[in-house]
Structure formats: C-alpha cells, structure tokens
Amino acid sequence: MYISWYMQHFLYLFMTFFPHCSLVWSNVCVVPSLSGQDSILEPLSFPEQTIDSSNTFVPQCPRNELLVCLFCSESTPLLQKDVLLKHLLLEHKLVIADVKLIADLPKYMLYWKGRFLEQPVKDFCSVIKTNSTGPVEKQENYFLLCDVLPEDQILREKLQQKRLEEVLEQQQKERDDSSFHRLCMFCSEEFTGNRSSLLNHMAREHSFSIGLPDNIVYCNEFLDTLQSKLDNLQCLYCEKIFRDKTTLKDHMRKKAHRRINANNREYDRFYVINYLELGKTWEEVQSEDDRELVDDENDDWSDWQSHPVSAVCLFCDHQSDTMDHIYTHMKEAHGFDLHSLKTELNLKFYQQVKLVNFIRRHIHQNRCYGCQENFDSRADILHHIMAKSHVMKLPEMSIWDQPQYFFPTYENDALLCTLSDSDEDERDETNRSEDIPVIAEDISNLKILKQTSVLNQLLKHRGSTC
C-alpha cells in the first residue's frame, strides 16, 4: 500500500521514540526492533559543503515569541521549538508535518490550540493505532497534523501570504528610508541617506556585491552579520578563520572571496525571493523562471555537466564520487566489506537497505551495532569496533531486518542508491541476455542477395511510377 511522505515522517518519529511497539495504519504493519530508544527527531542529511548548508530556511519571525502546546499550558521559546515538538509527540502523541515550512509557527500553534478546544483532535488528524494486535489496554492512538487537511493547507498559505506582505512592507520602508547611516566594511568610508549608496559603493569600489538593493530586506541585520564575521577574522565565502586582518584581507583578494557563499542558508532570510513561494528556495524559484524562458526548439545540451553523486563512508566523514572507491575505503580503512556480507548472507536489495540504515543509525548514536555498548563520541565507537573486531560482527538478522530500517537515517544517503540484488541475480540476468539466439543473414551470394533485396524492388517500383 502507498504511504505518503507525511506518513513516512510520522512512522519515522514514532519508531524513534517507541521502538518496542508494533504499529498499524490501515493494512500496513510495522514492528520495530528492540534496539533501545533513540534521540533523532527527524531524518538527518549529510552536509554538501564544508559549511552547514543543510538547514532549511526559516522565515523571519520575532525570536522572543513563545510556542504554546496545543493541549496543555506547556510553552517554549521559538528558538527551542524542537523541545515542544518532542513534548507533543511524547505527551500528546501528535506530530506536525513540515514544521520548517510554516511561516509563522507561533500563530499556527495558537490557531490549532483553539480548534482542538472546539472539536476532538481526531476530526482533523490522521489516526494511527499502535499494538493493534495486542491487548486493548496497551493500544494507543497517535495523530498526524499536515496540509493534506484542506483547513491546514489554507492556514499555512494564509500565514505565508501574511509573512510575504510583512516582508514587502519592510522592504519598502528600507527603500524609502533616508536616515540610513553606516561605514563601509572595507574602507571605513561613511555613507548616509539611502542604503543603495553603500551597497553600490562596495560593489563598484571593492568588487563585493550582495545583490541589487531592491532585492534585499532586513539590510541592517544583513550587514551586521557580515561585519561580525569580518570582526572575527572570518572569510565571508569559505568561512575560514585567520590570525589577523591583513592575512584575511589578502586571502579574500587573492582567492576572489569578496563575496558571500550562496549555499549558506544563513543569508536566505535577507532576500525577498525566499519569501515568494512556500517551501521553495531562491534556487528553485530561479530555476523555474529559467525553464520558462527556454525555447524548446533551441535546446542545446552541449554544455551539460553531470554532477557525480558523492557517497559517505558508513564509519567516518570520507566521501567519494565513485562507489568503487567508497567500498574500497571502507574495506581498507575500517575492515568492512559490504560485498562480502551481501554474498555470505545472500542479502536481497531491501535487506541491504535495512542493514546500511541500521549501521548508520548506530554509528550516529555512538553505539556499537555488534554488542550494543554506548560511547561518548564517534572516535570512541570507532576505536571500539576496530579493537574488538566488531566491524563485521552483525547481530542476529531479526534485530536489523526490521521495517523501521526502510527509512534512511540520512535523507541524502547516496550509498543506498548504489545497492543491487545479489551477484547471482546479476549473473543470471547477464546469462539470460547471452542465451538469446542471434541468427545471422546468409551472405554467401551477395549478387543474388542484391538482386532479390526488398529495398531494390521498392526503388525499381518507385522509378517506374515517376
């Protein structure tokens, strides 16, 4: 049966906190392993750059606002929203989908708090029952609140629209503001009047451009962020720290680093384009605009450049663009041979997926997957599995061959994309293709063949009709 992304997210969260419970939704049954409690609130992602660019853009909102629980008096500051989300899951058995895409989370929570006072929560949420095959007293209902519900979708869209209006109003104020006063970050020249004078000066005199002034919002906060990095002797592009201002200045000039890194999501809130469409970054919006401008008749793919998928080692941060290299690295550096395990245990594709996710989960939690011992750091767990020869020591298959490990520990785990069925199946497929008979044409008498050719007869017929 098809399970939506929201339901997968719900199942992931549920099995993270309640690994001992079986869970049934419609005719889908999930029985997690007895591996102890985890502490992962949502699927992780490998960083694609040296800086942390994996964070989803959170719309600008007052940071001193409180988030209130939908059912009780519990509340937390907005910056500690994960605490309240965990509280909702553990205490009230409710999950909110796509929290990071909600433009104004405090108002969203207040709205649903009021609605839950008017009607039962099951009138709005998908209901999932646990331990459905067990005793009635051990059965519990869990709830998923998502924009599949029309009312929730309308609320999210209204909050997004209101946030956009607030941002555009703020941008207009900054564009009309004549009281702007600031020093240039590079030459300390003083600028008063409109912000555009400073931004244009930095672009023209110092080759440092953060974009057109009319595309920027919360400009003072943006400049404060950049100034703070420079004051801390940090390069604005690569984010490296230097020992003094002279070294930093030379580095940024020689390396052409007088620019900001577009992959750093810290800057997204300062660009109006990031508020235009719910859940889309400026790159996605821009790519859609570019596609609309392309003339289909003049498509030119000559400059196409493929971007290789980079897989990450199961045990350390080593990455490689080729799967052979990553498998070789794991075998030589850590003594882990996935191919050998696949052959020895005759693992099918989905069993390999679950094994990889099982190991990823344990390494992330600094827990040995061979003996279940916990450690304080990644270095400690790696030293343990090497010293105790636990690298290739797997627990009973019933421990890790569980449906909860269908869900990736890391959403962008490229290693999962390289898995295949057993080598025997691959050989069988090759043998089947080799068994197809190929009958060659008899060319022993080419003269007769040319005379009796169907093509030759067609050409003659065409000549006689012309």
Image (cartoon, rainbow, N blue to C red):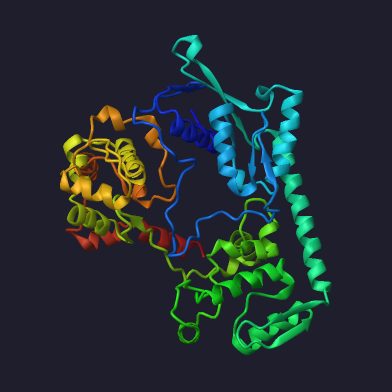
Q: Would you say residue 439 is visible in this rendering?
A: no
Q: Would you say residue 140 is visible in this rendering?
A: yes
Tell me: 315 left or right of 208.
Answer: left
Instruction: Indicate the position of residue 409 as horizontal and vertical percent values.
Output: 40, 43
Tell me: 25 left or right of 349.
Answer: right
Instruction: Indicate the position of residue 358 as horizontal and vertical percent values.
Output: 33, 39
> In this orientation, which residue lies closer to the viewer: 301 or 348?
348
Instruction: Indicate the position of residue 39 as horizontal and vertical percent values.
Output: 44, 39
461 vs 173: above or below: above
Residue drawn at the location 43% of the way across and 80% of the way down: 243
Instruction: Locate residue 142: give its quadrant.
Output: top right
316 vs 295: above or below: above
Residue drawn at the location 78% of the way across and 57% of the way down: 166
> In this orientation, which residue lies closer to the viewer: 150 or 265?
265
> In this orientation, which residue lies closer to the viewer: 426 or 236?
236
Residue drawn at the location 72% of the way across and 32% of the way down: 113
